[in-house]
Image: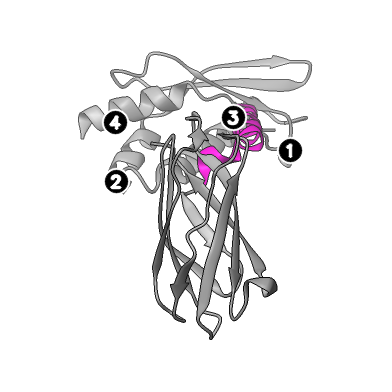
Amino acid sequence: MESKLVIFLLLSSIILYGCSSSGLSQKEAEELALQEYKNVLDDVYASTLADSVIAEAKDSLIVGRADKKDDVWHIYITSPREGFESSLEVVVYSREDVRIPAIEKASEEIKKIIDESPEAFLPEKCTFSVGFSCMDFRVTTSTVDLVIQPGIGKDITISKVSFTGDAISGKCQTSPNIKLKNGERGVISTTNCNIKKVDTKAKINVALEYYIDSPENTKIVQGEILSRVE
């Protein structure tokens, strides 16, 4: 319990909080700063630390210093507990204007990473439009294997499956010509593909060509794979 609390306080001490305080007395600013910090501790650690640990940490917090610059209070919160070696700055502008600059900055950085590489935060998946299910899949640097289950109400013949994407160089396709009854599973495998490994997951587009009675009436269903490349 003690070690968890020390780690907890150390982690908490590196976060910069902005809260708000024009016209506030020092005591009011200190109370706002302490309460804001305690609220954030509840929000951040409620699911990872025991209530008793959080309560003990909050009870140990004190105001180490209070400075007022240009009608803005800068409250520095610390703790006499062992392991809490730095202070936390809470900037108080007003009662209503509560800001948490460090968390906002961290959120912006995370959003930037997600925007640049959303695949890194999405689960692996293999999906097709209505009528087909991808039951299993595997991607390597030279192959793509799928387990397909049609559900369009009729037996079909899969004549061709093509894979494209930024991670794929050249052609990556197969012509299995396998017949599947409605609801029956079939394995689609490609070889001799050139798929590069990526830092996160590769996004691969799938075009599955099939027909019911005659190859002259071939239809195409689109799918997508998001997978690590083995």
- Dot 2: element: loop
* Residue wearing tag 4: 5
Q: CA distance from mark 4 to mark 1?
A: 30 Å
Q: Who's the residue at 38% across and 22% down the image?
A: 10
Between circles 4 and 1, the one closer to the viewer is 4
Residue 112 within the segment the image draws in magenta:
yes
Along the horizontal axis of the image, is 48 left or right of 88?
Answer: left
Few, some or many residues within 10 Å of mark 1 (<14, 14–19, 20+): few
* Residue wearing tag 1: 97
Few, some or many residues within 10 Å of mark 2 (<14, 14–19, 20+): few
Magenta stretch bounds: 100-122
Between circles 2 and 1, the one closer to the viewer is 2
Instruction: Give amino acid for label 2.
Output: Ala
Q: CA distance from mark 2 to mark 4?
A: 10 Å
* Residue wearing tag 3: 106
**Above or below: residue 191 compared with residue 15:** below
Q: Nearer the viewer, residue 74 or 156?
A: 156
Question: Residue 50: which disc?
Answer: 2
Which comes sooner in the sequence, label 4 or label 1? 4
Q: Are marks 3 and 4 in contact (CB under 8 Å)?
A: no
Q: Nearer the viewer, residue 35 or 190?
A: 190
Q: CA distance from mark 3 to mark 2?
A: 25 Å
